[in-house]
Amino acid sequence: MASPEKIDRLQHRLRNLLGRPELSLGLIAFDRRANVEAIERARAVGKSLLLCEECAPTCPNRENSYYAGVFQGSDPVIVQDLKKSKTRTGYEHHLRKHGHRGLLLYPLHVGDQLVGLMELASPQPGDLNAFNAQRLSDVVPLFATTLKRNLDELEDHVQAVIKRKYTAIHPSVEWRFREAALNYLEEKERGELSPELEQIVFHDVYPLYGLVDFRDSSRIRNEAIRADLSDQLQLALDVINAAGQIRPLPALEEVGYRLARHLERIESELRSDDESGVLELLRRDAEPLFGQLETYGTDVAERVADYRGALDPELNIVHRRRKEFEQSVAALNDTISVTLDAEEERAQNMFPHFFEKFRTDGVDHSIYVGAELHEDGLFDELYLRNLRIWQLMTSCRIEWELARVKTDVPVPLEATHLILVQHQPLSIRFRVDEKRFDVDGAYDIRYEIVKKRIDKALISGTKERVTQPGQLAIVYSTASEAAEYRRYIEFLQGKGYFGPELEELALEDLPGISGLKALRVSIVSKDEADDMGPPARPSAHEIETVLAVDQT
């Protein structure tokens, strides 16, 4: 889109063309829906006389303004003197406030589409008239065409951003979607009556899965909810009790009794329906009384003020502890996500692969790699093993970054790290209705079930979870998977990523899943890593060496 400097240059030329040295120029672009409501969603192109900081001034009766006239035809709207005009909506007031008296609004059409509006204004009444509008008739189409081209270019950029940021079509597999789309268009050109987009399925791809979770996040969230509800109940109870001291009314005592009962119960146990029940009690039976109760005296009025002051201005509830928890989770998730993205960019340079991540209380990621995912069908298991080492190293780097920022968040949550190993390749299919890839086939679904349940797995014969803060758990099924990862861990222990101890653990059966085992190793702490200097990334030669050993 045009810059303010370019608009200033156009303004200078129009001043010369019309002989009006004090002329002001503005340009507005409309979206696809061209009506008076579109002014609310319009954008200034470089600069606008009406739009202030990219939005129109408040104008409830905008349909009566001169700006509404540009949507009624292709003729310009001309105002000799805004000061003497009978039309006095918020838009005209805005223009007069900025010293504009004469006004000319020229709609910019390309074909039947209204793409924008040229604004011309002058501090001198009568400066803009039908003669000026006629002189502009040869210039206006150029403005309209240029604006349309800019809007089309902007739309292309918007679509590119949407495609890159909001859809599940990862760049590594975009070629396959393009291929399917071209086949679809060719079928239409051949006269096929009902061409269908073909299914996107990749067979024999190797999965890698990793998860960074926060220990006891559900318990900590519930404690935050309990604390906020208790605070709000206590503040409300303080109001009722203070009012009861001044006027001991049975009705106040009854409300206070129910507040106290709720407070006592949630402090001993928080049930799933307690939050809605407490808020309903406060909204229905306590808060409506506060307006009357604050007239009882200074003490009651102060307690009502304390109650209202404790409420979150947007949510209208006490939300301090929950907000601290949510801010902490968001900040730590951002750290995980940024670190993972940076490391993933390096991994893509090793070998192209499909990658996706999801954020909840923590971040999990999935990787698929194989010959069918590569446009040229190129693949070697060397690249798969390289990604497995990358995943181990990335877990450590995420832990170090979390340790760096953890002291800066209100609730310093502890992170756990898990990797799920599966040597057996599987198939993935793009689900059009969900706009994402999912595993395909009954056997492969077992892998998805394990992914959803494994973070809660316990060590056999104990109540201890396999995932522990500061450690990496590597869950596997077969002896060959364990042997491969032992080599990788030994390699990275020597590089300063992991501590010397390696645990080999059997896991309790999960619903529908049995026989899982795990390797667990401590991630070198940030302080230890700082003392030794940050672990160097293994060289290409070192990785090739350990992979060569693994293949023997």
Image (tube, rainbow, N blue to C red):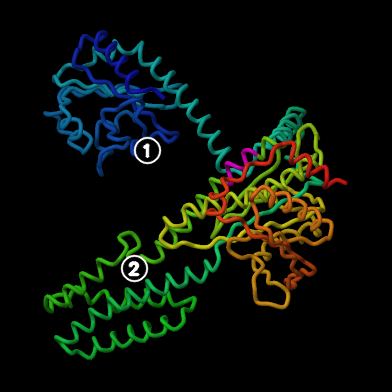
Q: Residue at x 68, y 45 (%)?
A: 390
Above or below — where is 305 with respect to 355? below
Q: Which residue carries the number 2 mark?
A: 318
Foreground residue among 81 and 121: 121
Figure quadrant of the N terminus: top left
Give the spatial CA distance, label 1 vs label 2.
Answer: 35 Å
- Which tag, 1 or 2, sits closer to the chain's start? 1
Image height of 5 relative to 188, above or below? above
Where is mark 1, residue-wise?
41
Position in image of residue 360 (x %, y %): 55, 58
Residue 194 seen from this side: no
Taking 392 as reference, is 245 above or below it? below
Residue in view at x 44 percent, y 18 percent? 145
Rendered image: mark on residue 87: none
Indicate left or right for 360 with 33 as reference.
right
Q: Quadrant of residue 342?
A: top right
Q: Residues within 10 Å of mark 1 (few under 14, many from 20)?
A: some
Left/right of residue 182 with respect to residue 30 in the rendered view: right
- Amino acid carrying label 2: it is Val
Residue plotted at (32% across, 74% down): 232
Mostly what secondary structure, the magenta segment?
Answer: helix
Q: Quadrant of residue 523?
A: bottom right
Q: Nearer the viewer, mark 1 or mark 2?
A: 2
Quadrant location of residue 468?
A: bottom right
The residue type indicated by label 1 comes to Arg
Return the residue nearer the eye: 57 or 347. 347
Q: Which residues are magenta?
A: 340-346
